[in-house]
Amino acid sequence: MRCSHRRAAFLTALIAAVAVAAAAQDEVFAFIPDGGRTLLETARAERLPEGLEGAIASQEGDAETWRGRLEAAQADAPALAALDAWQTDTLAHYLAANAPLAAGELPRDGRDMALQLCQSCHIITVVVTQERTREAWLRTMNSPSHIEIATTPAEREALADYLVINAGIPIDQIPPELRAGGASY
Ligand code: HEC
């Protein structure tokens, strides 16, 4: 009895500790700009115009096309009007890569991929402080050190598009614990 009680208490404490660690992790990475998945979820929380939702559910388009659709919807969607140019661009590229979007869970965005895939060999700082062209990002991701990372070619392009817009973060905006001695390769 006592024993299983203690085990339950231990498990509860462990789960709480893991949750706290996960939340602290999220906070450490808060300086990395939102990707398209989060931007879309946030905008949807205030409801998007039906025409735009219809397009998201049924249309393809390049980033330019989606930027136009997003800007056209701004008048009826304060959440879209509130986005800055980088965020609109990030969302436009996300939709270009992923629309038409089926109902349900949204596909991972560039930020999700960077956090999931780019920290096991070096810290994220190596990635998010680089300012590069799309071609340069794709070259890095197709280099021998990176080619085995589990992504489809389309996901690499989506990650590259996210990084073109959102990486190049100045070092003084990087949390101190992520600054020095980051590369372990
Ligand atoms: C399997 C280990 C591994 C993973 C996972 C990994 N990297 Fe790297 N990365 C390396 C190694 C090794 C180097 C240094 C040698 C080199 O440059 O290829 C490096 C260096 C880099 C550099 C700086 C040098 C360069 O090529 O410009 C960038 C930028 C980079 N990685 C981006 C990424 C991104 C983006 C991801 C996630 C998609 C990622 N890395 C995930 C192994 C990895």
Image (tube, grey):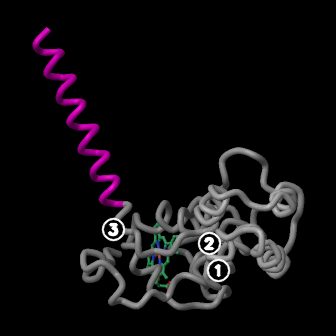
Q: Which residues are magenta?
A: 1-25
Q: Position of residue 84 (x, y in %)?
A: 61, 82
Instruction: Work out whether 170 lies above or below 56.
Output: below
What amino acid type should be assigned to the residue bearing mark 2? Answer: Leu
Identify the residue position indicated by label 2 in the image.
Answer: 159
Q: Quadrant of residue 185?
A: bottom left
Please tell me which residue is depicted at 58% across the width and 69% down the height of the picture: 35
Q: Secondary structure at mark 2?
A: helix
Label 3: few (<14), some (14–19) or many (≥20) C-alpha neighbours in 10 Å: some
Q: Position of residue 38 (x, y in %)?
A: 58, 62
Q: Is residue 119 left or right of residue 148?
A: left
CB-based contact (under 8 Å), mark 2 and mark 3: no
Instruction: Work out whether 30 lies above or below 179.
Output: above
Q: Quadrant of residue 151?
A: bottom right
What amino acid type should be assigned to the residue bearing mark 1? Answer: Leu
Identify the residue position indicated by label 1 in the image.
Answer: 138
Choose the circle earlier in sequence order: 1 or 3: 3
Q: Position of residue 1 (x, y in %)?
A: 14, 8
* Cα–Cα gap, marks 2 and 3: 20 Å
* Cα–Cα gap, marks 1 and 3: 26 Å
Identify the residue position indicated by label 3 in the image.
Answer: 28
Q: Residue furthest left?
A: 2
